[in-house]
């Protein structure tokens, strides 16, 4: 089990962003094979990451999200991607595959609805459109 496997999807995704934006200021390997890293935080603060690739759950970071908790945050993920770039590639590829499946699903749905819309007489189409817009508005109000 690697860092990516035990992290929340959000941490991995944010960690990848941090990695790509070169937010990892520095990292070095310790004698025991673990790593110490410094990662730029969202404010002015830098966070200290201790990364243990062999035992990912022993990794720590002193940011508010991970400090004192057994949580893998985006800073730990970012350092792990620096140490093992192939992991970052692996995750990016998975992500791309996922979004192309998503695109395909969307385009199938689109085809289905456009066929339906074309089969309707214009007056029915107008009514259906107005109903959808009203519903969309109400959904937006509810989610606020
Ligand atoms: Zn952190």
Image (tube, grey):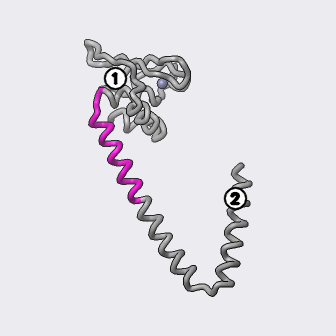
Mark number displayed over residue 139? 2
The label nearer to you, 1 versus 2, is 2
- Image quadrant where one finds the N terminus: top left
Residue drawn at point x = 34 percent, y = 31 percent: 81
Label 2 Cα neighbours within 10 Å, binned few <14 / some 14-19 / many ≥20: few
Residue 132 colored magenta? no
Residue 88 colored magenta? yes
Instruction: Please tell me which of labels 1 and 2 falls first in the chain.
Output: 1
Badge 1 is on which residue? 52
Whether ligand 1 has any atom under 8 Å from the Cβ at mark 1 is answered as no
Residue 37 position within the rendered picture, expressed as x and y whole percent measured from the top left? 38, 18
- Horizontally, residue 127 falls left or right of residue 68, namely right
Residue 142 position within the rendered picture, expressed as x and y whole percent measured from the top left? 73, 54
Label 1 Cα neighbours within 10 Å, binned few <14 / some 14-19 / many ≥20: many
In the displayed structure, 17 sits above or below 59; it is below
- Horizontally, residue 33 falls left or right of residue 19, namely left
When asked about the image quadrant of residue 54, the answer is top left
Q: Secondary structure at mark 2?
A: helix
Q: Secondary structure at mark 1?
A: loop
Number of marks in the rendered image? 2
Residue drawn at point x = 45 percent, y = 30 percent: 74
Q: Magenta segment, principal secondary structure?
A: helix
Residue drawn at point x = 39 percent, y = 59 percent: 101
In the displayed structure, 36 sits above or below 18; it is above
Which is nearer the eye, 1 or 130? 130
In the displayed structure, 110 sits above or below 141; it is below
Residue stretch rendered in magenta on the structure: 83-101
Residue drawn at point x = 71 percent, y = 72 percent: 131
Whether ligand 1 has any atom under 8 Å from the Cβ at mark 2 is answered as no
Residue 41 position within the rendered picture, expressed as x and y whole percent measured from the top left? 50, 23
When asked about the image quadrant of residue 77, the answer is top left
């Amino acid at each position: 089990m690697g860092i990516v496997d035990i992290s929340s999807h959000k941490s991995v995704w944010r960690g990848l962003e941090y990695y790509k934006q070169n937010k990892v200021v520095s990292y070095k390997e310790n004698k025991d094979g673990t790593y110490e890293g410094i990662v730029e935080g969202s404010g002015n603060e830098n966070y200290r990451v201790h990364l243990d690739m062999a035992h990912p759950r022993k990794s720590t970071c002193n940011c508010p999200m991970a400090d004192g908790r057994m949580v893998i945050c985006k800073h730990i993920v970012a350092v792990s991607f620096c140490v093992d770039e192939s992991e970052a590639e692996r995750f990016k590829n998975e992500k791309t595959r996922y979004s192309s499946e998503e695109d395909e699903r969307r385009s199938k749905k689109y085809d289905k609805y456009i066929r339906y819309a074309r089969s309707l007489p214009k007056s029915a189409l107008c009514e259906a459109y107005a109903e959808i817009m009203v519903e969309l508005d109400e959904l937006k109000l509810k989610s606020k």
